[in-house]
C-alpha cells in the first residue's frame, strides 16, 4: 500500500472513531438522565414510606389523632406530657418537609411532586397555627433556607 492509501485509511478510521465517540457520549447522557429519573422515583417512594407509618399511627390511635387534630386549639389545657408530644408531632412533620425541601433542591425530587408537598406544607402551617410555636420554640432547629420558606408561608397565613 502506498502512503496515500494508508493516510486515507487512517482518516477513515479517525472518522469512524469520532462517530463512535459521539454515539457513546449520547448514550452516556441518556444513561445519566435515566439514572436521575429512577433516583427521583426512588426518593419519592422513600418519602411516602417515611410519612406512611406516621399517618397510619394517627389513623389507628384515637388519642394521638385527637392530639394532632385539636392540639393547637387545646394547647393551653394540655398537660406537660401532651404539650411535649404535640410539639414532637409538629417537629416530625416539619422534619419530613425539610427533607423534601433539600431533596428537591438537590434534584432528587420531581418538581410536580414537590409542588404537591408545598401545598400540604402551607395547609399544615395554617391548620396547626405554626406561628404560635415557631419563633420561640421551633425555628432554631431547622436550616436557614428551609426556615426562610416556612417563615414566608407563616407571614402569608
Image (spheres, grey):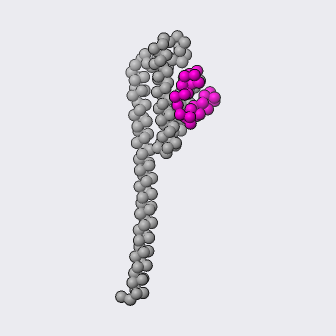
Q: Residue at x 49, y 24 (%)?
A: 90
Q: In the image, residue 94 lies at what x, y percent?
A: 50, 29
Chief SS of the magenta region: helix
Q: Say which quarter of the image contains residue 138.
A: top right
Vertical comparison of 133 with 148: above or below = above
Q: Which residues are magenta?
A: 132-157
- Whether residue 130 is visible, yes or no, is no
Query: Is residue 132 shown above or below 52?
Result: above
**Which residue is pictured at 57% across the width and 22% down the height?**
136
The quadrant in which residue 148 appears is top right
For this orientation, the residue located farthest to the left is 1
Q: Please state if 135 lies on the left or on the right of 107 as rendered.
A: right
**Quarter holding the C terminus?**
top right
Name the image quarter holding residue 53.
Answer: top left
Residue 56 in the image, given as x and y percentages of width and height:
40, 26
Residue 93, compared with residue 7, is above or below; it is: above
Q: Nearer the viewer, residue 49 or 101?
A: 101
Residue 34 visible? The answer is yes
Kindly give the residue lying farthest to the front in the view shown. Answer: 140
Q: Name the quarter where the N terminus is drawn.
A: bottom left
Amino acid at each position: 500500500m502506498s502512503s496515500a492509501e494508508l493516510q486515507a485509511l487512517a482518516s477513515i478510521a479517525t472518522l469512524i472513531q469520532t462517530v463512535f465517540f459521539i454515539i457513546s457520549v449520547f448514550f452516556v447522557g441518556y444513561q445519566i438522565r435515566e439514572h436521575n429519573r429512577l433516583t427521583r422515583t426512588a426518593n419519592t417512594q422513600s418519602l411516602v414510606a417515611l410519612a406512611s407509618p406516621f399517618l397510619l399511627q394517627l389513623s389507628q390511635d384515637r388519642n394521638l389523632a385527637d392530639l394532632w387534630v385539636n392540639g393547637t386549639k387545646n394547647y393551653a389545657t394540655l398537660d406537660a406530657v401532651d404539650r411535649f408530644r404535640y410539639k414532637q408531632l409538629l417537629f416530625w412533620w416539619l422534619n419530613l418537609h425539610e427533607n423534601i425541601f433539600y431533596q428537591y433542591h438537590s434534584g432528587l425530587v420531581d418538581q410536580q411532586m414537590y409542588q404537591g408537598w408545598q401545598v400540604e406544607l402551607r395547609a399544615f402551617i395554617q391548620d396547626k397555627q405554626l406561628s404560635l410555636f415557631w419563633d420561640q420554640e421551633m425555628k432554631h432547629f431547622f436550616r436557614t433556607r428551609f426556615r426562610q420558606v416556612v417563615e414566608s408561608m407563616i407571614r402569608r397565613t
